[in-house]
Image: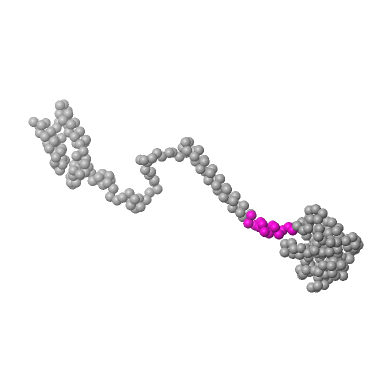
Amino acid sequence: MLRVAAVRRLSSSLWRPTHVASSSSSALAHCPVGGDDYGIYSFNSFLFNSHPLFHSPSRGFGSGSGSGSISPKNERRSSIPEVPATVAAKKSPTPKIVYDEHNHERYPVGDPSKRAFAYFVLTGGRFVYASLLRLLVLKFILSMSASKDVLALASLEVDLSSIEPGTTVTVKWRGKPVFIRRRTEADVKMANSVELGSLRDPQKDSERVKNPEWLIVVGVCTHLGCIPLPNAGDFGGWFCPCHGSHYDISGRIRKGPAPYNLEVPTYTFLDHNKLLIG
């Protein structure tokens, strides 16, 4: 009779959750352990431990103040967060990072199957950076070089076939006048007959010309930058009327305040009748 009463009490307690603690404790107190009664005790323990009604928080377990509660209050509060996860993370930041890997696979660091792709990306990025750096360096270097219009004015090609012996032609090169004189044999002899000791800026005629027939000098006075007059002066060369400087048939200073001879530019004979200045 005691066994039947215990089973009935246990079954009725499933529908009266508020009396589970007292019923279970009284039933277990009257069930002896050992012998044939051990099966009833095991069955009661199985029911208490496995049935969801004893663990469901919606059935009211743990709501009372008694010590026989099956589901404690602290366990319920920890399983159900009171604030959203983002708010909790802001209130209590932590350096520990937890990744959500429920929908993707996370590869370990240094995975051999990903090395080729990683090397390809790194090498491609470095190649792009090196190309950009090379482009910037070339742009900077080219910006310091002369432009095409300046290079076009850097050299001047002159046709010499139309120049008569004993005459002087003035051309413009780099914004400055250049005197081209076709000398006669008498002019060449006169230029070579001058004593170097009498010159202010001693210089042989052969050092100032590549072809004795042609004399090419910059038409700027070495005193104050004036333009001398050709076929004038005391020595048959050039004369600067500004301050009275006289140059001979070789462009050397012979009289006046000018300190140096007329400058000889860089030039080349392309052929018998072609001259390239610059």
The answer to which of 81 and 139 lies nearer the viewer is 139
Name above or below for residue 218 compared with residue 121. below
Whether residue 246 appears in this view of the structure is no
- Relative image position of residue 25 (x, y in whole percent): 15, 38
Query: Residue 37's image quarter?
Result: top left
Query: Residue 13's image quarter?
Result: top left
The answer to which of 204 and 235 lies nearer the viewer is 235
Name above or below for residue 83 compared with residue 203. above
Whether residue 265 appears in this view of the structure is yes
- Relative image position of residue 45 (x, y in whole percent): 19, 34
Q: Residue at x 87, y 67 (%)?
A: 236
Q: Residue furthest front?
A: 162
Asked if the stretch drawn in magenta spans residue 145, the answer is yes
Q: Residue at x 86, y 60 (%)?
A: 205
Quadrant the N terminus occupies: top left
Magenta-highlighted stretch: main secondary structure?
helix
Q: Residue furthest left?
A: 1
Q: Residue at x 70, y 58 (%)?
A: 152
Q: Residue at x 40, y 48 (%)?
A: 95
Which residues fall within the magenta stretch?
142-156
